[in-house]
């Protein structure tokens, strides 16, 4: 879901990110926010803790392998 986000979020990106073309994540009050680092004032995706946990479990399980 996209929409408004609180001001003053602490955004983080992967240590593996070597350019400005990265995804950034922030957390506040049980909601995770995802944004494109190239457009920090643009829209952000919002996820509940349950949605984020399911996504993280899918990444760990290899459900999102690209290029096959």
Image (tube, grey):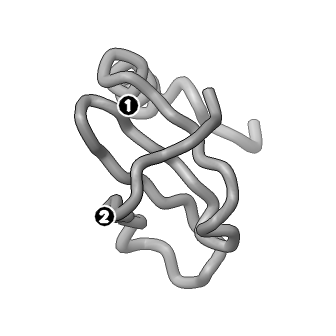
Q: Residues within 10 Å of mark 1 (few under 14, many from 20)?
A: few
- Residue at horizontal 75%, vertical 43%? 67
- Residue bearing mark 2: 10
Q: Looking at this view, is 52 or 31 the one in front? A: 31
Viewport quadrant of the N terminus: top right
Element type at mark 1: helix
Q: Is residue 3 above or below residue 5?
A: above
Residue 7 screen position, x and y as percent = 40, 58
Percent position of residue 58, x then y: 45, 23
Q: Which is nearer the N-term, disc 2 or disc 1?
A: 2
Marks 2/1: CA–CA distance: 20 Å
Q: Is residue 38 left or right of residue 51?
A: right
Q: Nearer the viewer, residue 34 or 9?
A: 9
Taking the view exactly as shown, the residue that stands out farthest to the left is 29
CB-based contact (under 8 Å), mark 2 and mark 1: no
Q: Is residue 44 left or right of residue 33?
A: right
Residue 10: % across, % down: 31, 64
Q: Helix, strand or loop at disc 2?
A: loop
Q: Residue furthest bottom?
A: 19
In the drawing, what numbered circle is on residue 56?
1
Q: Position of residue 19 (x, y in %)?
A: 59, 83
Residue 31's tag is none
**Residue at point 39%, 27% (across, down):** 52
State which quadrant residue 41 falls in: bottom right
Quarter of the C terminus within the rendering: top right
Q: Residue 54's quadrant in the figure?
A: top left
- Which residue shows up at 67% across the image and 50% down it? 43
């Amino acid at each position: 879901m996209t929409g408004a986000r609180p001001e003053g979020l602490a955004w983080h990106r992967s240590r593996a990110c070597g350019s400005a073309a990265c995804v950034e994540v922030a957390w506040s009050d049980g909601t995770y926010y995802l944004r494109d680092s190239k457009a920090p004032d643009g829209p952000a995706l919002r996820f509940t803790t349950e949605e984020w946990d399911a996504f993280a479990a899918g990444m760990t399980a290899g459900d999102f392998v690209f290029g096959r």
